Amino acid sequence: MNNRETLVLIPARMASTRLPGKPLADIAGLPMIVHVWRRAAEAGIGRPVVATDSEEVRSAVEAHGGEAVMTRADHESGSDRIWEAVEKLDSGASASFILNIQGDLPTVGPATISACLAPLLDGPADIATPAAIITREEEKTNPNVVKAVGTPIGPEGGSNRLRALYFTRATAPWGEGPLYHHIGLYAYRREALQRFVSLKPSALERREKLEQLRALEAGMRIDVAIVDTVPLGVDTQADLDRARQILAA
């Protein structure tokens, strides 16, 4: 795969309700969004670009050697924002794959980013995303921990990959066996992302408040790559404090 075949996009907006201005929150001497951009660059799988509606974010990224593209402020989701970025950055449609990395994952590992793309390189999926086995009991019943439910499709029945059947905030599936913590990174085939953003929000998406269910309800295939760790998502001040401790170490 040529790296020019892949765009690695990081949507970032300043208007967070729980932690306003969080893309620029200082973590170990760098804005959070710069940490995410650097992890994307370290993955080495494509061109990393921050997609933002904020001149402050753009300036911060560029000041640290990164690339950013300005997008509209009225997008309802990160997926809509990255599609606008794709049309601006790659009007000639040379990129076959688009990665969407949330801008509030400062501890995401390059290996997790690479694993997210892998199912598209060697399988028929429209979309790929990572998940990790849940090891903490309290997370199994926590509705903020989204569970990926799927059937194993790894080599010889192994468990390194799933074909997604559902995503839910409930504890699922029932019975003995692992539960999987879904991680909010997505890799799309270009045409799949274009189709996805053209669809209206679906019934289960609205009910569970999980955007990826729109794709499943439309018959699109999502494969899940099983990884070892879950990156910390920064939504609150407590999350930010924890991220500072992790990256300071």
Image (cartoon, grey):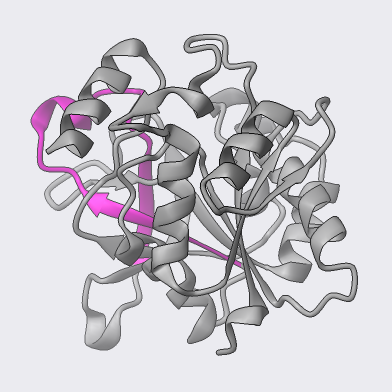
Q: Which residue is pictured at 17% across the width and 44% down the height?
A: 175
Looking at the figure, which quarter contains the C terminus?
A: top left
Vertical placement of residue 84 versus 204, above or below: below
Q: Quadrant of residue 181?
A: top left
* Horizontal side of residue 201 vs 130, given as left or right: right
Q: Is residue 83 located in the magenta-colored stretch of the structure?
A: no
Q: Which residue is pictured at 66% across the width and 52% down the height?
A: 215
Vertical placement of residue 41 versus 3, above or below: above
Nearer-the-camera pick, 51 or 154: 51
Q: Position of residue 79 (x, y in %)?
A: 69, 45
Tally of numbered tags: 0
Looking at the figure, which quarter contains the N terminus?
A: bottom right
Q: Position of residue 219 (x, y in %)?
A: 68, 60
State which region is magenta: 127-151
Query: Is residue 123 visible in this depiction of the protein?
Result: no
Q: Which residue is pictured at 49% across the width and 74% down the height?
A: 45
